[in-house]
């Protein structure tokens, strides 16, 4: 018995009238504060001819993901490092064992080294780093759940996305750090941390005298 051709699938409605299964996702992205902040920072970087690098621990790549939600983000997003463990922080971005031993992974000195290391390993103008305790466990005296340390570093002479001929990145001209404690569950802490990192990165660029 010879099988005939399969019937064409029946389509309900015209292409214009059929529901778009991705429409809700696109609408959510456009209204997501983290994605909106990432796009705003990206536009600023693009206007300046610079790029961003992310070095993330507790946010696990959330900031990098927010950058890439916007089409054309390769114009301003160079690369991202997820440095979840101490070993990853040391191996990928050169955080010193001394800083980790003296201050702990969740500390401003380590956040600063993460940001500097991101610049040194990229052609970016701006580095954003995040390290914290998202919960629900992991809090210690003086560093409760929700504690997040941030680093922002600006490259000397700007950064155009091109690493040096010797294979290195950009020298660091300016580093800012901060520590905040966020309320909420794990997901809420991570999202608040990502949003703060992006918003403050935008403010830092606005204040950069080299603009």
Image (tube, rainbow, N blue to C red):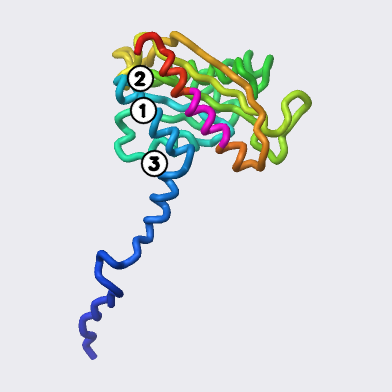
Q: Is residue 131 one of those drawn in magenta?
A: no
Range covered by the magenta-colored residues: 192-200
Q: Which quarter of the figure is the C terminus placed in?
A: top left
Residue visible at 58% across and 15% down in the picture:
96
| Few, some or many residues within 10 Å of mark 2 (<14, 14–19, 20+) | many
Question: Marks 2 and 3, Cα distance to the nearest angstrom?
Answer: 21 Å
Residue underneath mark 2: 123
Question: Marks 1 and 2, Cα distance to the nearest angstrom?
Answer: 7 Å
Residue visible at 29% across and 67% down in the picture:
17
| Residue 78, label in figure | 1
Relative to 28, does residue 54 appear above or below in the rendering? above
Q: Position of residue 141 (x, y in %)?
A: 78, 26
**With 91 as the anchor, is 72 left or right in this view?**
left
Is the C-beta separation of discs 1 and 3 under 8 Å? no
Is the C-beta separation of discs 1 and 2 under 8 Å? yes
Q: Position of residue 117 (x, y in %)?
A: 48, 18
Q: Which corner quadrant of the image does residue 39 belong to?
A: top left
């Amino acid at each position: 018995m010879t099988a005939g051709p399969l019937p064409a699938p029946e389509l309900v409605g015209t292409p214009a009238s059929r529901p778009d299964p991705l429409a809700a996702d696109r609408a959510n992205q456009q209204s997501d504060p983290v994605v909106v902040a990432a796009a705003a920072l990206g536009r600023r970087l693009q206007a300046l001819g610079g790029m961003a690098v992310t070095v993330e621990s507790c946010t696990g790549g959330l900031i990098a993901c927010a950058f890439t939600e916007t089409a054309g983000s390769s114009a301003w997003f160079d690369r991202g490092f997820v440095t979840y463990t101490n070993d990853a922080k040391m191996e990928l971005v050169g955080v010193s064992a001394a800083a980790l031993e003296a201050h702990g992974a969740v500390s401003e000195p380590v956040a600063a080294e993460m940001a500097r290391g991101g610049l040194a390993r990229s052609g970016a103008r701006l580095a954003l780093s995040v390290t914290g305790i998202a919960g629900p466990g992991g809090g210690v005296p003086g560093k409760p759940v929700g504690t997040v340390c941030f680093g922002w570093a600006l490259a000397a002479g700007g950064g155009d996305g091109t690493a040096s001929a010797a294979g290195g990145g950009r020298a660091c001209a300016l580093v800012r750090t901060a520590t905040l404690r966020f309320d909420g569950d794990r997901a809420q802490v991570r999202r608040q941390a990502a949003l703060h990192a992006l918003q403050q990165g935008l403010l830092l660029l606005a204040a950069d005298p080299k603009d």
